[in-house]
Image: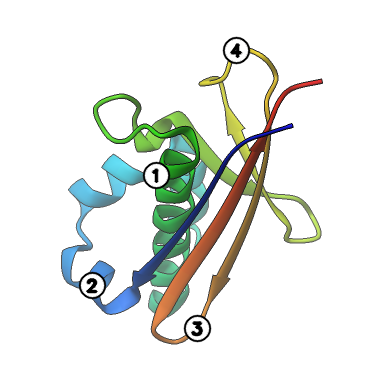
């Protein structure tokens, strides 16, 4: 059964304007930060941060909680070898399943999340 659905869209130009070490440390988990630091292309770095930010905002919408109730770093958006993103977290207690999809254009990053009851 679906517990929640969330979607978010961010303008990459807006992310670029606020991109700083402090912002990155607030948004990215340790695993994500390691991956981010290995990226060499600035536009790929921007898409990476924008996509993670959109995905985490979508998660907050799906669980009806936002910053203060939980934190961006409570969730890691990682990817399988195929490139498919997945969410790693200890936030949930009942083995909930989180499905995430992220997309980018030159100007936007968007993410959709579906959270289902654990099995």
Q: Earlier in the sequence, mark 1 or mark 4?
A: 1
- Per the image, the residue denoted by label 3 is 105
Of marks 3 and 4, which one's residue comes earlier in the chain? 4
State the image quarter where residue 29 is shown: top left
At numbered mark 3, what does the secondary structure look like: helix, strand or loop? loop
Between circles 2 and 1, the one closer to the viewer is: 2
Residue in view at x 49 percent, y 52 percent = 55
Specify the quadrant that holds the N terminus: top right
Q: Is residue 68 above or below residue 85?
A: above
* Residue indicated by mark 4: 93
Residue that carries the numbered disc 1 in the rendered image: 28
Which quadrant, please, contains the C terminus?
top right
Disc 2 from disc 1: Cα separation: 17 Å
Which sits earlier in the primary sequence, circle 3 or circle 2?
2
Closer to the N terminus: mark 2 or mark 1? 2
Instruction: Give the Cα distance between marks 2 and 4.
Output: 34 Å
Q: Measured from the top left, where is residue 60 in percent x and y?
A: 41, 39
Where is residue 5? Give x, y as percent.
Answer: 56, 46
| Residue to which mark 2 is pinned | 14
């Amino acid at each position: 059964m679906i517990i929640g659905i969330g979607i978010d869209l961010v303008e990459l130009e807006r992310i670029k304007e606020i991109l700083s070490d402090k912002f990155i440390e607030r948004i990215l988990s340790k695993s994500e930060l390691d991956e981010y630091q290995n990226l060499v292309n600035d536009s790929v770095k921007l898409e990476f941060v924008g996509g993670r930010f959109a995905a985490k905002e979508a998660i907050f919408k799906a669980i009806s909680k936002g910053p203060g109730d939980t934190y961006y770093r409570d969730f890691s958006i990682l990817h399988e070898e195929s490139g498919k993103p997945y969410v790693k977290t200890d936030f949930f207690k009942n083995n909930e399943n989180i499905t995430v999809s992220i997309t980018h254009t030159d100007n936007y990053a968007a993410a959709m999340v579906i959270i289902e009851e654990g099995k």
